Image (cartoon, rainbow, N blue to C red):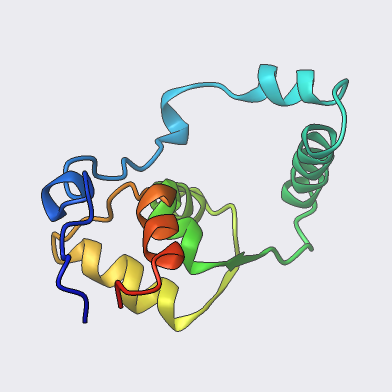
Amino acid sequence: MSENKNLGHNSKKDFLKNPVEHIDITSFDSRTIISAMEKMSFVSRETANAASIYNEMLKDKECTIFLTLAGSTSAAGCMNIYKDLVKYNMVDAIVATGASIVDMDFFEALGFKHYQGSHIFLSHICNSSSSI
């Protein structure tokens, strides 16, 4: 192990100062911006297309809607979105990895938080041959 344990400005205190804040989709009306995305390109237009398909699914009472989760989206600030989708009967089933259920949701339910990370720290570790 390297004698140089100083990783510059990347201390534990630095990493634990900015918790991830989960978005509240009930606090604003996103329809205007989603509609505007229909006239944009690439992913924006596909996002608007996905919203249109989802709206059709919600209208079809025979349609079963599965929400598929990646754990990283939970930790990134989407937990309230999932909660509201269930609360307002906008999904019928959820498919999630163990990481989504245990690592992300369970620990936050216990009062722990996720924090905003930095690519600079990872870059420093990966580019330093003697740090690990």
Taking depth in this image into account, of 124 and 66 the one nearest to the observer is 124
- Residue 21 seen in render: yes
- Check the image and report above or below for 106 versus 16: below
**Left/right of residue 16 with respect to residue 70 in the rendered view:** left
Q: How many numbered tags mark residues here? A: 0
Taking depth in this image into account, of 126 and 91 the one nearest to the observer is 126
Identify the image quadrant of residue 36.
top right
Taking depth in this image into account, of 16 and 128 the one nearest to the observer is 128
- Check the image and report above or below for 15 versus 92: above
- Tell me the residue at 39%/66% (across/down): 128
Q: Position of residue 91 (x, y in %)?
A: 59, 59
Q: Position of residue 123 (x, y in %)?
A: 44, 56
Q: Position of residue 126 (x, y in %)?
A: 44, 66
Q: Position of residue 76 (x, y in %)?
A: 43, 51
- Tell me the residue at 38%/57% (across/down): 124
Which quadrant is the N terminus positioned in? Answer: bottom left
- Tell me the residue at 79%/34% (across/down): 48
**Left/right of residue 82 with respect to residue 67 in the rendered view:** left
- Check the image and report above or below for 17 versus 62: above
- Residue 83 seen in render: no
- Check the image and report above or below for 20 versus 36: below
Identify the image quadrant of residue 26.
top left
